[in-house]
Amino acid sequence: MNPIYINIILKMLVAFCILLVYINLSGKGSLAPISAIDQVGNVVLGAIIGGPLYNPSISFLLLVIAATFWAGLLLLVRYLTFQRTFAKDFVDGTSIRLMQNGILLTQNFRKARLSIRDFIMLLHQRWLHQFRNSE
């Protein structure tokens, strides 16, 4: 077998193992994003793993170091956001209440940068139809 193919197969196996360890350590059952940082982190992790697979000039060791470092950084951010409120607010932003007791809090929609129409559409998609406007 061609040594280039062996190199690709070995890189794929190691990358797969890194992903399995990352998923298990993160406590998630999949790479499905929960937050924006998860989405960006997954895309970057995919690029870190996917780029070197077919590029023989990037060493096996560099792939392992880069993927492990990035996965570790994502795990650290995930840990900090679960342990510290200030870290969660910094990474995910603070929550803004848009509805209380079935009443839309229209003054908070500008802070959330969300239109009332879009919010009502989201509610209807979740089969919620009964609410009142606070104005």
Image (spheres, rainbow, N blue to C red):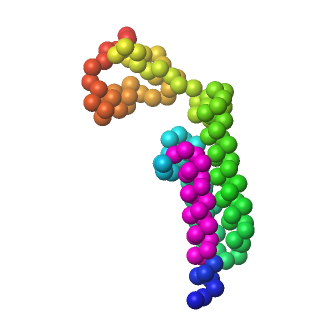
Residue 45 to residue 62: above or below: above
Q: Nearer the viewer, residue 85 or 132?
A: 85
Q: Taking the image as drawn, is residue 121 in sight?
A: no
Compared to 84, does 1 lie above or below?
A: below
Magenta: main secondary structure: helix
Comparing 106 with 88, the one in front is: 88
108 above or below 126?
Answer: above
Q: Position of residue 53 (x, y in %)?
A: 61, 71
Percent of width and height locating residue 68: 68, 57
Does residue 47 appear to the left or right of 133 in the view shown? right
Residue 56 or 134: which is nearer the viewer? 56
Q: Is residue 19 visible?
A: yes
Q: Does residue 87 appear left or right of residue 16 in this picture?
A: right
Q: What residue sits 56% from the left and 50% below the top?
A: 24
Residue 88 on image: x %, y % = 62, 31
Dividing the image into 4 quarters, which one contains the C terminus?
A: top left
Residue at x 64%, y 69% (from the top left corner): 52
Q: Does 40 lie within the magenta span?
A: no
Q: Quadrant of residue 124?
A: top left
| Identity of the residue drawn at 48% across and 50% down | 30
Please name whichever residue, 131 or 17, is drawn nearer the observer in this view of the structure: 17
Q: Residue at x 47, y 20 (%)?
A: 97
Image position of 106 with respect to 49: above or below: above
- State the extent of the magenta-drawn residues as a range: 8-28
